[in-house]
Image (spheres, helix red, strand yellow):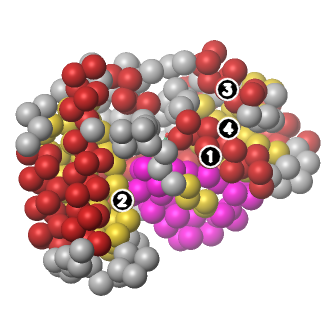
Amino acid sequence: MRLLKSIAELREARAAAPGSVGLVPTMGCLHEGHLSLVRLARAKSDTVVVSIFVNPTQFGPGEDFERYPRTMEADLAALEQEGVDLVFAPPVHEIYPDDFDSVVEVGSLTRRLEGEARPGHFRGVTTVVAKLINLVQPDRMYMGEKDGQQLRVLRKMVKDLNFAVEVVGAPTIREADGLALSSRNRYLTPEERRAATVIPRALAAARERFGAGERDARSLCEVVRAQLSAEPLAQIGYISLADSETLEDLERVDGRAMLSVAVQIGSTRLIDNIVLEPGA
Ligand code: PAF
């Protein structure tokens, strides 16, 4: 496994990389969710590239850029174990030199949910991922369903801008008690960690009601709200039941839909989602 810190080194290594290339973009602090993406990439690609870059432009003022966990040594050990070929871990100025002055922005998909709660967030994500795709030129790029809106936004960018890469979405990996794996789970105190299990419970309750035949979006969201409201440490950011592709709010679930939530537990903001689909 080679660790590359500069764009010049990456370009050289990419030019020499044999066969198909799979890219797993990350911000480090790797957990089983990331490693499941790496395993998918390993199984399908001749060369696996993982990027580790805590991207400052996707954090808003007052968000957790400074305290975002950086665990490079452990990350590299885990990636070596998974048989990764190249790790690209550039310093900030390599990606954003002083005169950097361009953005990549996707339209309406980015104005809802996370985009509404975190203005500018997706502009940062799409700009850095567009750069990574240009640099790595992967055949496939692997992303988790856990960041459901991000996955859809990046698919839209790739389609609209004709990037020659297939975006592969992979299922959310959960703890035994249902909490979705996230690097931000590290911020939770033991009490908050216990409280956070209300999120998968609330989504599971809605799934159960959906399974029993409920199709009214408001009623399904109410199921989630009732569960989340019963947990004193949880503050609801949003509850959304939206078309799985356009992310437009639904009144009824007649096709594939994404039920997503953002919940503040103490000082930590967590997101999660499930897909509901009649007949699936
Ligand atoms: O999901 C993430 O970790 C980040 O948003 C990504 C895709 C690596 C871009 O910085």
Q: Identify the residue position indicated by label 2 in the image.
A: 274
Label 2 element class: strand
Marks 2/1: CA distance?
Answer: 18 Å
The x and y percentages for residue 258 are 33, 65
Q: Amino acid at mark 3?
A: Ala
Residue displayed at 69% across by 57% down: 140
Q: Amino acid at mark 1?
A: Leu
Q: Does the magenta portion include 154?
A: yes
Q: Identify the residue position indicated by label 4 in the image.
A: 50
Residue displayed at 8% across by 45% down: 229
The x and y percentages for residue 3 are 75, 25
The x and y percentages for residue 159 are 56, 70
Marks 2/3: CA distance?
Answer: 28 Å
- The tag on residue 37 is 1
Residue in front for this viewpoint, 252 or 16: 252
Q: Nearer the viewer, mark 4 or mark 2?
A: 2
